[in-house]
Image (cartoon, rainbow, N blue to C red):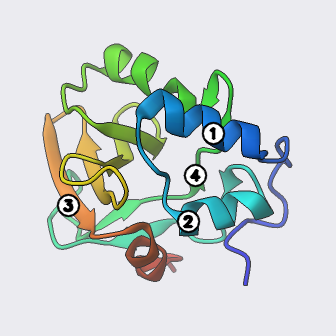
């Protein structure tokens, strides 16, 4: 079952060269489940738009918005992580940004492992970091569409 919105723009295909560039640049292994969804479509809008979380966000809700994922291409998608960290004043190290709009981001957190990242939420306006999921697989299971 696809997670991608059917009407989404179709970005360039993910290649093995893109994966190798990203993993070499960040010195980590990207999650296989993340790569699997990017092989279907290399970033774009999702069918879902939210994720249940165990914390209260800035809106006072137990959810965060997640309606798109970054893909992997040179100077695009996750490869813009360092630029975005600097632009938005993100000081957390060993992360790869996989979604976000500047006010908040979803990221892989490689602090404890270079092969099995946790998924975190970074609120740049409140300078807060929260655990969302222990893995990308778990994140996928938490995604839903608000009614």
- Which image quarter: residue 62? bottom left
Nearer to us of marks 4 and 2 is 2
Mark 4 or 1, nearer chain start: 1
Looking at the image, is mark 2 or mark 1 earlier in the sequence?
Answer: 1
**Mark 3 or 4, nearer chain start:** 4
- In the visual, does 31 lie left or right of 17? left
Q: CA distance from mark 4 to mark 1?
A: 19 Å
Q: Which residue is mark 2?
A: 32
Residue 55 sits in quarter: bottom left
- Residue ID for mark 3: 131
Residue nearest the viewer, comparing 40 with 146: 40
Would you say the residues marked 4 and 1 are in contact, meaning their CB atoms lie under 8 Å apart? no
Residue placed most toward the observer, 108 or 122: 108
Q: Position of residue 28 (x, y in %)?
A: 41, 44
Helix, strand or loop under label 2 = helix
Query: Is the N terminus in the top left, top right, bottom left or bottom right quadrant?
Result: bottom right
Q: Pointers 3 and 2 in contact (CB under 8 A)?
A: no
* Residue at screen point 43% across, 33% down: 26
Q: Mark 2 or mark 4, which is nearer the start of the sequence?
A: 2
Q: CA distance from mark 3 to mark 4?
A: 18 Å
Residue 124: x and y in percent read 24, 33
Pinpoint residue 46: horizontal percent, then vertical percent.
64, 63
> On screen, 131 above or below 44?
below
Q: Cα distance, mark 2 to mark 1?
A: 13 Å
Label 1 and label 3: CA atoms lie apart by: 27 Å
Residue for badge 4: 69
Q: Tell me the element at label 1.
A: helix
Cα separation, mark 3 vs mark 2, equals 20 Å
Q: Residue at x 48, y 58 (%)?
A: 66
């Amino acid at each position: 079952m696809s997670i991608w919105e059917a009407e989404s723009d179709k970005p360039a295909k993910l290649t093995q060269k893109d994966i190798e560039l990203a993993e070499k640049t960040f010195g980590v292994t990207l999650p296989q489940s993340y790569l699997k969804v990017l092989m279907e479509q290399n970033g774009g809008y999702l069918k879902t738009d939210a994720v249940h979380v165990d914390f209260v966000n800035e809106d006072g809700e137990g959810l965060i918005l997640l309606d798109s994922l970054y893909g992997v291409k040179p100077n695009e998608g996750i490869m813009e992580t360092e630029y975005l960290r600097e632009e938005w004043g993100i000081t957390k190290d060993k992360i790869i940004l996989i979604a976000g709009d500047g006010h908040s981001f979803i990221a892989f957190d490689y602090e404890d492992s270079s092969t099995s990242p946790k998924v975190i939420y970074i609120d740049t306006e409140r300078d807060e970091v929260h655990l969302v999921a222990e893995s990308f697989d778990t994140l996928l299971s938490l995604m839903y569409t608000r009614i």
